[in-house]
Amino acid sequence: MITQKLNADRQGINTAAEILKNGGVVAIPTETVYGLAANAYDEKAIKAVFKAKGRPQDNPLIVHISDMEMLNEVAEDIPKTAFRCAEKFWPGPLTMVLKRSDKISDCVSAGLSTVAVRMPSEQTAHKIIKESRLPLAAPSANVSGKPSPTTYTHVINDLDGKIDAVVMGAECTVGVESTVITLAGEHPVLLRPGAVTIEQLKEILPDITVDKAVLSELAPGQKAASPGMKYKHYAPQTETFLVEGENFADFVNTKQNALAVCFAEESEQIKIPKIVYGTNTNPETFANKLFGVLREVDKTGVKTVFVHAPEKSGVGLAVYNRLIRAAAFKVIKL
């Protein structure tokens, strides 16, 4: 298969939409990460997404829409709280898990009675969905388990020759996948943190709780209700450890054949090879750079990487959630 490289202009958007309408698979930019999109109503196309990624089929996909009419197509019995969240956070990096309609197959929902839905704010993605007139099921456009792609070159490095096309848009502005909440139960639950924070959600959903799987592994046999919950994710090939505590520089300076991924504020104190991935006073910078940094780690040739953990609040919770999975839950507490 030859992967077409499409510009993020009118012609590229039209071509991407035609490929999707004809059952193809296209990587598209969103504000969070690049998504690997296919017609959410086409099981053959959805299976091609799983095949290209090497993604386990018990891991549900997120359906991307361009307007509220599409929401009513893919979901049913939608609670009022969903409309309040949509008014506040859509278009944007919030995914809501709702009761699925009959149009959504088991292939998309991994056999669950629910569907995860979001409306991206990135204009190229929004236009492709609108032009195709289709809801698009789209996980991150990377080989399953690797760091998610935030540039089109990441997509090409992972999936060139495995998918029909990639739209060469801008670098993703958020840098981590969307926040996922479920509104399909008695009470709202945060399943995956992202740029829409638990603090912001509580303004509309004061009774929302955080699923235990945000910071720990699922129990054996427990089904994943959202992408990003069940498997080791986002991981470089280099063995990775997440390090909590204030004496990070002193700790890593004793290590051999190792790399430190650190805060800008502590960079000068670190004597071993290092990559700065943000400033501790602005956790949004961690999210923006995280996956690009994790991809750079493997180019250094070191045996081990130690990543300084951010605070588990605001967007920092989303970054911690990705890092603990990248480290396969190996955490060192200083």
Image (spheres, rainbow, N blue to C red):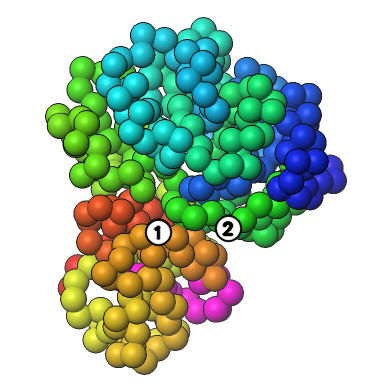
Give the camera-side residue of 47 and 200: 200
- How packed is label 1: few (under 14 Cα within 10 Å), some, or many (20 or more)? many
State the image coordinates of residue 128 (x, y, percent, origin top left): 66, 34
Say which residue label 1 marks.
287
Write the residue at 62% across / 56% down.
Answer: 170
State the image coordinates of residue 71 (x, y, percent, origin top left): 48, 18
State the image coordinates of residue 93 (x, y, percent, origin top left): 42, 41
Task: Give the image quarter of residue 299.
Answer: bottom right
- How packed is label 2: few (under 14 Cα within 10 Å), some, or many (20 or more)? some
Task: Give the image quarter of residue 48.
Answer: top right
Say which residue label 2 marks.
171
Asked which secondary structure carries label 2, the reply is loop
Left/right of residue 64 with respect to residue 169 in the rendered view: left
Magenta-highlighted residues: 297-309
Left/right of residue 315 with respect to residue 74 in the rendered view: left
The kind of residue tagged 2 is Glu
- In front: label 2 or label 1: 2
Asked which secondary structure carries label 1, the reply is helix
Q: Up-down: is 309 above or below 96?
A: below
Of the numbered discs 2 and 1, the one sitting upstream in the chain is: 2
Q: How many angstroms separate mark 2 from mark 1 (CA)? A: 13 Å
